[in-house]
Image (cartoon, helix red, strand yellow):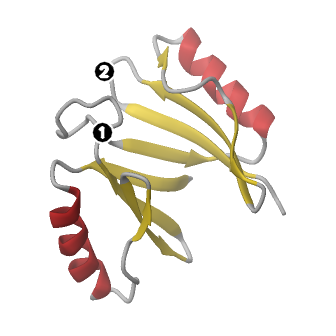
Amino acid sequence: MFSHVMVGAADLEKSRRFYDAVLGTLGIGPGVANASRYFYRSPTGTFGITTPINGESACHGNGSTIGFQVDSPEQADAFHAAGMAHGGTTCEDPPGLRGTLGAQMYLAYLRDPDGNKICALHRVPR
């Protein structure tokens, strides 16, 4: 069901040190930097930490994203459309491809009626 979980961090390096240590006890390697984020990957999913991209303070919701794995771009578009039809608001870029040629993803971001950020994610096969 989930593709990834990301939480906001007020002090990214302090959070990286914390998650490097605690996730290291689970056999997960150190966070891999990507812009203002760090990602922790396992065979079953990805956890990330980020400074909020809107420049506001990190809190229990700002900077957080809950990602839902989908089977196709069409399913991501349907996810987005259903959310918009039921009180959601679009955020970030419109649904579409992102990433490099080696790791493209089709992403569709929304905020639920309470402002929580969610995302439908389809990893494009290589």
Q: Secondary structure at mark 1?
A: loop
Rendering coords of residue 41 (x, y %): 49, 72
Q: Which residue is mark 2?
A: 114
**85, above or below 102, in the image:** above
Question: Where on the picture, by quarter, is residue 82?
Answer: top right
Rendering coords of residue 113 (x, y %): 37, 17
Please report the residue visible at 38 percent of the width from the left and 55 percent of the height from the top: 37
Q: Residues within 10 Å of mark 2 (few under 14, many from 20)?
A: few
Name the amino acid, label 1: Pro
Rendering coords of residue 57 (x, y %): 17, 35
Please report the residue visible at 53 percent of the width from the left and 38 percent of the height from the top: 119
Q: CA distance from mark 2 to mark 1?
A: 17 Å
**74 with respect to 42 (left or right):** right
Please report the residue visible at 60 percent of the width from the left and 39 percent of the height from the top: 120
In the image shown, does 25 or 103 lie closer to the viewer?
103
Rendering coords of residue 110 (x, y %): 49, 26
Q: Earlier in the sequence, mark 2 or mark 1?
A: 1
Q: Secondary structure at mark 2?
A: loop
Please report the residue visible at 28 percent of the width from the left and 46 percent of the height from the top: 51
**121, above or below 25, in the image:** above
**90, above or below 31, in the image:** above
**79 with respect to 32 (left or right):** right
Q: Which residue is mark 1?
A: 52
